[in-house]
Image (spheres, rainbow, N blue to C red):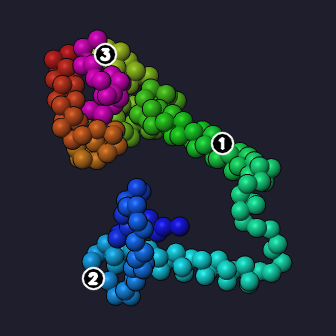
Amino acid sequence: MHDRLNPDWAPSLNLRTSRSIQTPPPVMASTSTTPALSRYNRHMERAQRKLDMSQFASLAHPDVLDDISDEANNAATQTDVNNQCLQGMEYEISALRAENQHLKNQLSDKYSEKDFEGKDDKVKHLTGLSSYEMLMLLFQYLSPYLPLSLVLSQFRTFSLTLMWLRLNLSVMFLAYEFGLSQSTVSRIFSSVITVMYYK
């Protein structure tokens, strides 16, 4: 009945006096002078274009007889579509969780004891030690004295130090490889190399 979106609209409840005054409805100008009125006009034009497009679309597809509002209220149609979407989303979520867990396992095993086990060539290339057994023997000797870190296990701090010594890797590369900041890599290296020097 009343256009409540119009910026000139004001509620008129109980504003009439005992004698009724007839006033003509305000005529809307096509050109607006205030920002609120121009926003309102743009809103009305968009709504009209949307209505025209929906009417055009219904004319373009005369074989579609169902009314859109009837489809929206049809519980069976709504449930079928939602179940299919829901099942697809659940499948996608479970696949992403499995992939995420797989990647986490790969990252946690990187440069760990398990990663070096049975790979003497890898041990020799990355640490300079001849075999996995030699690496573990040296680690077991130094492990009571190695610093405890909240971000890396003792073995990974040990392997980080050996890789830096053997390959002369940059601090930035080691920081990216181990997922640490550069200052943390430097601190770990300093503490482990100090233990290695004194023992």
Question: Was residue 149 drawn as part of the magenta stretch in this picture?
Answer: yes
Foreground residue among 193 and 157: 157
Residue at the front extreme, as displayed:
19
Give the CA distance from mark 1 to mark 2: 52 Å
Give the CA distance from mark 2 to mark 3: 79 Å
Residue at the bottom extreme, as displayed:
30
Q: Residue at x 31, y 16 (%)?
A: 143
Give the CA distance from mark 1 to mark 3: 45 Å
Image coordinates of residue 64 in percent, x first then y, are 81, 74
Q: Residue at x 53, y 67 (%)?
A: 1
- The residue where tag 2 is placed is 33
Q: Residues within 10 Å of mark 2 (few under 14, many from 20)?
A: few
Vertical order, 71 against 89 (above or below): below
Disc number placed over residue 76 in the picture, else none: none
Foreground residue among 70 and 130: 70
Point out the tag, 1 or 3, that comes first from the N-terminus. Answer: 1
Q: Amino acid at mark 2?
A: Thr
Image side of residue 118 versus residue 198, left or right = right
